[in-house]
Image (tube, grey):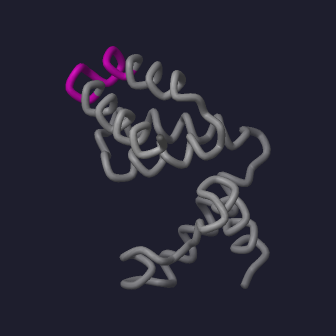
Amino acid sequence: MSDVYAKAEEIVQTYRGESGTLGKGISGQMAPEVERRKDELLWGTIWADPAIDIKTRSLCTISALMALGIEEQLLNHCRWALHLGVSREALISLASQMMVYAGLPRGHNAMRIVKEALDSAD
């Protein structure tokens, strides 16, 4: 295991909790080498860069997923953000902002996903 992959695992466990793992999804099953390289780049390099703290990276990622309408990953990232200590109010405010910047349909979908994440956290 490379040092970068070990750092990726560390960041993922910080973000997702101790049960957070890499390479377990469909991409890891179908294309494990591609998944490993993606994890090293995304988690071991980009998310590990200290220039932006992990909560800010989380909110940036959530904003992008809201704007793009990527619902499954948005739900996961909202749950992980809550695990990090991002407030309920911050997620609701972000979804409200997306109604203006990403359009009402995407903003409404984002609000629904935030509600689902909040409900599952209760």
**Magenta stretch holds residue 88:** no
Quadrant of res 39: bottom right
Which percent across, then down, holds residue 101? Answer: 36, 19
Image side of residue 78 versus residue 11, left or right: left
Secondary structure mostly seen in magenta is helix
Q: Residue at x 29, y 39 (%)?
A: 69
- Magenta residues, start to end: 98-106
Q: Residue at x 56, y 72 (%)?
A: 22
Does residue 42 appear to the left or right of 79 in the view shown? right
Q: Is residue 47 above or below residue 117?
A: below
Q: Nearer the viewer, residue 88 or 101?
A: 88
Give 122 or 31, whichever is nearer the viewer: 122
Q: Quadrant of the N terminus?
A: bottom right
Taking the spot 31% from the left edge, 46% from the top edge, the residue there is 71
Q: Residue furthest top?
A: 100
| Residue 115 horizontal/vertical position (percent) | 36, 33
Residue lying at 36% horizontally and 84% vertically, measured from the top left: 30
Q: Reply above or below: 33 against 108.
A: below
